[in-house]
Amino acid sequence: MSLLEIKDLHVEAGGREILKGVTMNLEEGETCVLFGPNGSGKSTLLSTIMGYGQTTVTSGKIIFKGEDITGMSVDQRAKLGIGMMMQRPPNVIGVKLGELVKVTAANGKGTTGRENEFNMQDFMERDVNVGFSGGEIKRSELLQLSAQSPDFVMLDEPESGVDLENIGLIGKKVHELIYGSEDGKTREKNVSAFVITHTGQIMDYIGADKAFVLIHGKIAREGDPRVILEDIKQNGYGVDDE
Ligand SMILES: Nc1ncnc2c1ncn2[C@@H]1O[C@H](COP(=O)(O)OP(=O)(O)OP(=O)(O)O)[C@@H](O)[C@H]1O
C-alpha cells in the first residue's frame, strides 16, 4: 500500500520554479534513497513534504496515508507521523535542546532520557543548534527524531560532515529509527524512510529498497539503489547546468 504519493508537484522558491512536476510513490515499510546533483531540488522536495520552508506549491498533490496533506501545517504533518532531519536546521535561540526533546516526546511516541546514547549529554542545557558543529547537529537532529518516533522519516544527507568515528553512531541510530534495533538482528518496527545521500555511505547501515534520481526538479530515474549508485559513480549524472 502506498504511504506517500506525490502527484505532478510543482514548487517555487524565490520566484523560480524548483520542482517541475515530481511524481513518485513510496510504499509502506519501504526505505528509498534520493540521489541528484547539487541544486537539483532534493532538499526542497523533502521540505515541501514536511511543509517547512519558504517554498510555494503552485500545483500538484502530496498524499500521505491516503490523506491530502498539501496544504497542512508542519505540526499537523508531524502529528500524522512525518519526521525530518534537516541538513541545516535553524538556530532556536532561547529554547534548550532538553526542553525541545521533552516537548517532541510528549507529542510523539518516543521517549526522553536517551541523550547519552547520542553523545549529547553536554548539550541538553544549550540553545538548540546554537554553535553546534556539523556532526553535533546531526546527532541532535537524530535525538529529536528518536523522541518523536515518526512512522515516516526523512533524512537530508545524514552522513555529510560526520567524522569517521561518529559515522558508525549515526548509522546505528538511523538503523534503530527505522527498524527499532541498532544491530539489525531484530526488527521491532519497519518505519518508512526517504533519505538524501550523495555518497551512498548511509546504505551500509540501512537496507535501501528503491532509489530515485532528481535532476533539474524532475525524477529522471527510479530503480535499484546499488545499480544506480554504481552508475552515478562510473558515469556521473550526465547533465549540464541549465
Ligand atoms: N527560498 C529559496 N529562495 C531561492 N532559491 C531557493 C530557495 N530554496 C531553494 N532555492 C534554490 O533551489 C535550488 C534547489 O535547492 P535544494 O537545496 O533543494 O537543492 P539540493 O538538490 O538539495 O542541493 P544540494 O545537493 O546542494 O544540497 C537551488 O538552486 C537553491 O538555491
Image (cartoon, rainbow, N blue to C red):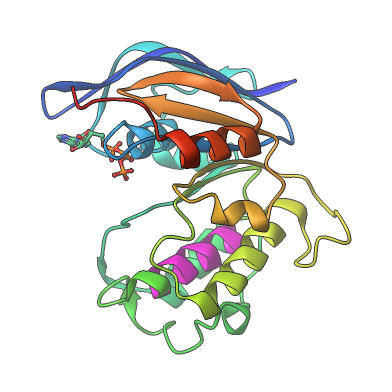
Q: Is 96 or 83 nearer to us in this picture?
A: 83
Q: Residue furthest bottom?
A: 122
Q: How many marks?
A: 0
Quadrant of the frame with the N terminus: top right
Quadrant of the frame with the C terminus: top left
Question: Is most of the magenta stretch helix, strand or loop?
Answer: helix
Q: Quadrant of residue 79?
A: top right
Q: In the image, 93: left or right of 178?
A: left
Is residue 70 visible to us here?
A: yes
Q: Residue furthest left?
A: 15
Q: In the image, 18: left or right of 141?
A: left
Residue at 15% x, 22% y: name it. Answer: 16
Q: Report x, y in % for residue 63.
A: 54, 19
Q: In the image, 187: left or right of 109?
A: right
Q: Report x, y in % for residue 10.
A: 32, 15
Q: Quadrant of residue 209?
A: top right
Q: Report x, y in % for residue 74.
A: 41, 39
Q: Is 81 or 3 nearer to us in this picture?
A: 3
Residue at 44% x, 33% y: name it. Answer: 235
Please say whether residue 68 is one of the residues in the magenta stretch.
no
Q: Residue furthest front?
A: 234
Please say whether residue 145 is one of the residues in the magenta stretch.
yes
Residue at 44% x, 73% y: name it. Answer: 99
Q: Residue furthest right?
A: 186
Indicate the quadrant of ligand 1 in the picture: top left
Q: Report x, y in % for residue 112.
A: 61, 73
User: Which region shows up in magenta?
Assistant: 136-148
Is residue 109 visible to us here?
A: no
Q: Is residue 226 above or below residue 169?
A: above
Residue at 57% x, 77% y: name it. Answer: 118
